[in-house]
Amino acid sequence: MVVCALGALSGWVVWRYRSTVEVSPYDLAVRSVAENAADGSRIGATPVQIGELRALIRPPTSGHSWLIYWGGNTSTYFKESVETVRLLGVPEEIGVLIVAPPGYDGSAGHPSPENVPEAAVAARDWLIREHHAKRIVTGGFSMGALSAIAAAQSAVFLLSAPTLFETGDPSRLIRLKTPVRYRPPIDAPAPKVRALVLHGENDDGFPIQMGRDVAHWLGGRFIALPGVGHVDLQTSATALSEVRAFLIEQLE
C-alpha cells in the first residue's frame, strides 16, 4: 500500500511538473527614486508618486492627450518600458505616464491578480484628476497588457497580450506549486474600446493564439509579426511603427 501511495505521489509530481512548464516567476526589484529618474531622463520623464505606486511622467507640451504604458514582468521594469516609449517616438504634445504595478521598481506592495488591475485604474483616475487628462490611450507589453486592458477607456494597444499568465514567487519548487493566475475578463463583455493587438510569431512566452483571442474579444485589429519573439516585440521597429500610427490616430 505504501508503495502504491509513493507511486501515486511520484506520478502526481511528474504530471504537475510537466503541466506548469510555462510558469514564469515574479521578477521584482527595488530601486531608488534617483535610479528611476535616471531611467526616465531618456525621454524627459521624471518620477512621481501615485499613492503607493511609482511612475514616470512627461506632461504634454500642450493639450490633454496622454499615453499610459505598462511594461512586462522584469526586474528592469522602467528601463525596458522607457526604451519602448523612446523608440515609439511619442510626440511631445502627447503626455506620457509609465506606471509600475505593485512590487515593481519602487511601487510598494506585492503584485496580485486583484491589486494589479486596481492599481492600473487608480493610476488612470489620478491622471484624469490631477492632470485633467481628456483623451487617453493605454498600452502594455506582456503582463502589462492586463493593466492596459483594465484601465482602457477609449483606445488600447497591446504587445504580446496573454489570455493566461501564470506566475509566483521565485522557488525551485515553483512548478510544483499552484501558480498565481492572471487573466483578462474574456468571459465578460469586452470593454468598448478601439484596440490594436500585436504578437510575434516566434513568441516563446505566450502562444500567438492568445493574442488572436484577445483581439477577437476586444473586436480589435490583430497583427502577427513574422520572426519576432516575445522580448523582441517591445522594440520591434515594425510593431512600434504600427503602434505609433494607431496612437496618433486616436489622439489627433
Image: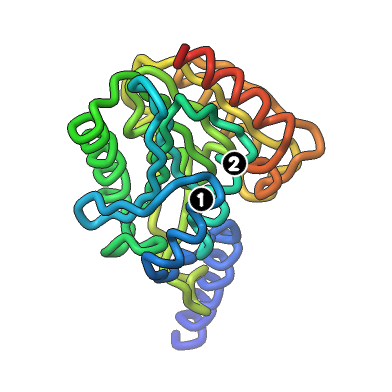
Residue drawn at point x = 53 percent, y = 12 percent: 249
In the rendered structure, find residue 91 and report the number of the disc placed on it: none
Q: Give the distance between the C-alpha atoms of the residues marked 1 and 2, in whole angstroms.
A: 16 Å
Give the image location of residue 145, x and y in percent.
Answer: 47, 38
Element assignment for label 2: helix
Residue drawn at point x = 50 percent, y = 53 percent: 41
Residue drawn at point x = 61 percent, y = 18 percent: 245
Mark 1 / mark 2, whichever is N-terminal? 1
In the rendered structure, find residue 86 and report the number of the disc placed on it: 2
Residue density around tag 2, few if under 14, some if 14–19, many if 20 or more, within 10 Å: some
Query: Relative to 15, is 189 on the left or the right?
Result: left
Q: Quadrant of residue 5?
A: bottom left
Give the image location of residue 43, x and y in percent.
Answer: 53, 45
Q: Is residue 69 above or below residue 173?
A: above
Q: Check disc 2 and give the amino acid type.
A: Arg
Q: Nearer the viewer, residue 235 or 183?
A: 235
Q: Nearer the viewer, residue 139 or 164?
A: 139
Q: Nearer the viewer, residue 248 or 223?
A: 248
Q: Residue furthest bottom?
A: 2
Q: Residue furthest front?
A: 61
Give the image location of residue 229, x and y in percent.
Answer: 72, 45
